[in-house]
Amino acid sequence: MSHAEEALPLEKPLFTPGVFLLLGLMGIGFGFAVYRYIYGLGSMTNLNDQYPWGIWIGVDVASGVALAAGGFTTSALAHIFHREHYHAIVRPALLTAMLGYTFVGMSLMVDLGKYYNIWHPILPSMWQGNSALFEVAMCVMCYLTVLYLEFVPIAIEGLKGKLNLPSPLDRLRGPIESLLKKGWVQQIIELADRFFGKIMFLLVIAGVVLSCMHQSSLGALMAIAPYKVHPLWYTPIMTLLFLMSAIAVGYPMVIFESMWASKAFGRKPEMEILTPLAKLIPFFVGAYIVAKISDLVIRGAYVYIFDGSFQSMMFILEFGFGVLLPFFLLLSERVRRSPTGLFICAALYVILGVLLNRINVFVVAYKPPYAEGPYIPSVGEVAITVAMISALILCYRVIVSILPVLPAPEGEEAHTA
């Protein structure tokens, strides 16, 4: 195993001021969620018959799915196109995607009026092949299953090596290690390791296909509402644009996550991997720019860009500062080699380019014909969204502390069997 492929659990204290902050934000959101489940959606949200969905769909679901695209794009790069140099960033990207899709499902549990029926799509009697939401539901369930199966070998590697538990759970180390040393447990672990080693290529291919289907099907949700979506965003090729933007954000999201983790955990940025990865971004972002501009020109919707409306200002912020600016900056080798410059470019495209695009499509651009007023998220909606994001970050922290996900720092060797 090369150094680029080695991974170690993070040996850092689990409880830090940042973790306590995350726990506090989660507690506030949990309180609002309990209130929502007891008294219903109408009791704490500003959702109504005119605006049946809001930031829980625009941010938690649509944005969460898009920003999880680093999982399938990085897996495709390393495993399908055999770019071995990028293996070190596959595991963190896979973990981010797995957690992202997990919290998409949890967000839907809050957003759905009859949340207790969320399991219905697994029943063939409930299937509706003409529904875009049906495809979204099936792809989420299938791809989330694939993500967890892809993560199993990482868990197996952690079980085969020296068990690493954060200090609050350290007292469980002895009993767990004793159990893992039993012969029948070792046989199960070895059997699972060999099994997943043989089918991993199938899981990678399935993950890429399912994720592409899901990314595009999210665009189809709004493509069926031509009179409710502003012309700057509505287009018959919305499914294609959603897929292209998701593919384009995959590598910036990996860079954003890697550099954020490096800063948070006091590690050296993996510039020897991230700089070459950044060279690929302009190709995908450039293709999206060409498709988006061509669509605006062909439909004649470009006339709305500078009409002074709130929608036009949001579009300029999204496309000008979130797509065009990082695209031109990343053409510079000096920017790609600079940790600060590379992080800023990745953050611009992740936060303004794609996250804001999904918010614009599902919230800003959406206006029902008979709306009695604008939709403004309630405090409870914002609190639950912040709690979901906080929970995702905390789960990431816990998992990388227990399992070998992050690349081993210079000078350290993986302690796997």
Image: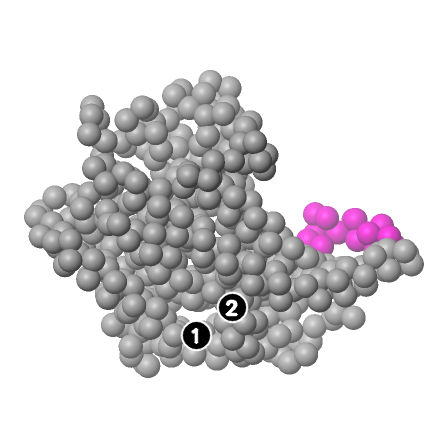
Above or below for 139 versus 368: below
| Of the pair 303 and 306, the residue shown nearer to us | 303
Q: Which residues are magenta?
A: 165-179
Check the picture and name the quadrant holding the N terminus: bottom right
Please tell me which residue is depicted at 45% across the width and 57% down the height of the picture: 212
The coloring applied to the image is one colour
Residue 297 belongs to magenta span: no
Tags 1 and 2 in contact by the CB under 8 Å rule? Answer: no
Disc 2: CA contacts within 10 A as few (<14), some (14-19) or many (>=20):
some
User: Disc 2 on helix, strand or loop?
Assistant: helix
From the image, give the main secondary structure of the stretch colored magenta: helix
Lower sequence index among marks 1 and 2: 2
User: Disc 1 on helix, strand or loop?
Assistant: helix
Q: Position of residue 159 (x, y in %)?
A: 76, 59
| Of the pair 335 and 92, the residue shown nearer to us | 92
Q: Is residue 271 left or right of residue 45?
A: right
Q: Position of residue 61 (x, y in %)?
A: 43, 43
* Residue located beneath label 1 in the image: 277
Q: Which mark is residue 61?
A: none
Q: Position of residue 265 (x, y in %)?
A: 54, 62
In 3D space, how far apart are the residues under numbered discs 1 and 2 (Cα atoms)? 13 Å
Please tell me which residue is depicted at 62% across the width and 66% down the height of the picture: 201
Above or below for 376 versus 257: above
Please tell me which residue is depicted at 12% across the width and 44% down the height of the picture: 309
**Whether residue 323 can be seen here:** yes
Q: Position of residue 115 (x, y in %)?
A: 51, 28
Residue type pointed to by label 1: Leu
Residue type pointed to by label 2: Ala
* Residue located beneath label 2 in the image: 76
